[in-house]
Image (spheres, rainbow, N blue to C red):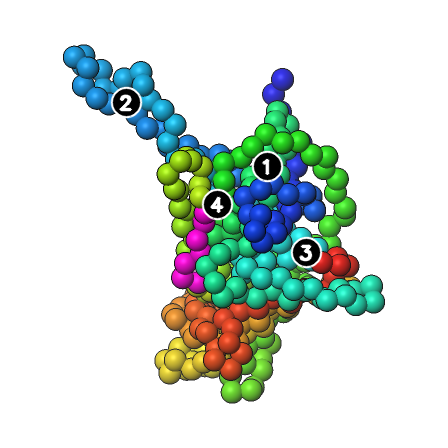
Amino acid sequence: MSNIGRRGALGIGLETAGSEGTTTAIDMYIPYLSCNLNGKHTVIADVAAKGIRDTQGNDSTEGKKWGEGAIEVVLEPRSAPYWFGLALGSVSSSAGTGIHYHTITRKADNQPLTATIYRDRVVDEVKFPYSVVNTLELNFADDVAKVSVDVLSKFPTAESDTSSFVDLELFTFKHAYVEMAISGATSTLTLREFTLNINNNAEVRHSPNDNDIDKIVSKGFDVSGSAVIDFETTVQRDAFKNVTKQSLSVVFTRSTNVITITIPQFRVDSLDIDTPNDDISAETINFVAEWDSSTTSTISVDVENNVTSY
């Protein structure tokens, strides 16, 4: 019987330090927009000459194995700390009265935070241990805010689970605002679209005696993005021309749930100004986050929700 992917499920659970690569319990089941996380395998071919014209012999064998793929979800206050935590590497939580507070920061060393990701594909159920977020993209315009992640992992194992879901608390464009500040002067932007990119430049490493991955290393850390706003002032034009350093806050708020993304210092790396004859003039601010010595940070994410800890 044929099936559609919508009948499947996605779940996640963070692995503990020292137990990376061992499947852990699934903490949350997350509705998803798309998911193509799959096992990958490089076959070692038998191409030795054997007195025949055929280039492929019959002694091919297993080569390197790993997991890889992309997941897209809506930005949601309870599940967002998983994706941002995996992208940045460190999550700390403190309890409040009904509302709990989570701070997500860039980890200093090269060992990424890892998770077990569960996929129910209707025909089978598999878990991807040692799942690492290599890149993350946050985007919103005039629809729901979305998060897309590229994941690397160990090769999946067959393991079942029982999924259950709770109602989503969606963040749309009406729940978001973006502020930029230059020399303490803060302005709220008239946004058309906003994109944030986090890149860990992760590398999969294999070692002798096992064809599954040995470890994944997070290398150079980069944060960049873009904001499309109405061209109403020369502030960003001048900031681009003079390489003026700015700060940036992106805030999503709905009832008691809040996500605040802070970039303490960035530069406008390129600026595109578009003045169409019959539409509103706009400028696209392409920015690159810089390490800020006063806050010792490139980016941080604060989340307020009803989840005790991650």
Residue 60 in view of the camera: yes
Residue drawn at the location 51% of the way across and 73% of the way down: 297
Q: Earlier in the sequence, mark 2 or mark 1?
A: 2
Give whichever of 295, 265 is nearer the camera.
295
Which residue position holds label 3? 310
Tell us which disc is closer to us: 2 or 4.
Answer: 2
Please say if 44 is above or below 192. above
Label 1's element?
A: strand
Label 2's element?
A: loop
Q: Amino acid at mark 1?
A: Lys
The answer for how far apart the CA atoms under marks 2 and 3 are is: 47 Å
Residue contact at pointers 2 and 1, CB within 8 angstroms:
no
The answer for how far apart the CA atoms under marks 4 and 1 are is: 13 Å
Residue contact at pointers 4 and 1, CB within 8 angstroms:
no
Residue drawn at the location 42% of the way across and 35% of the way down: 210
Q: Amino acid at mark 2?
A: Asp
Within-10-Å neighbours for mark 2: few <14, some 14–19, many 20+:
few
The answer for how far apart the CA atoms under marks 2 and 1 are is: 31 Å
Residue 37 falls left or right of residue 98: left
First to last magenta residue range: 215-221
Give whichever of 52, 270 is nearer the camera.
52
Q: Earlier in the sequence, mark 4 or mark 1?
A: 1
**Residue 116 within the segment the image draws in magenta:** no
Which residue position holds label 1? 127
- Residue 191 is situated, as x and y percent measured from the top left of the image, at 56, 68
Within-10-Å neighbours for mark 1: few <14, some 14–19, many 20+:
many
Numbered badge on residue 17: none
Which residue position holds label 4? 152
Q: Earlier in the sequence, mark 3 or mark 4?
A: 4
Residue drawn at the location 50% of the way across and 71% of the way down: 298
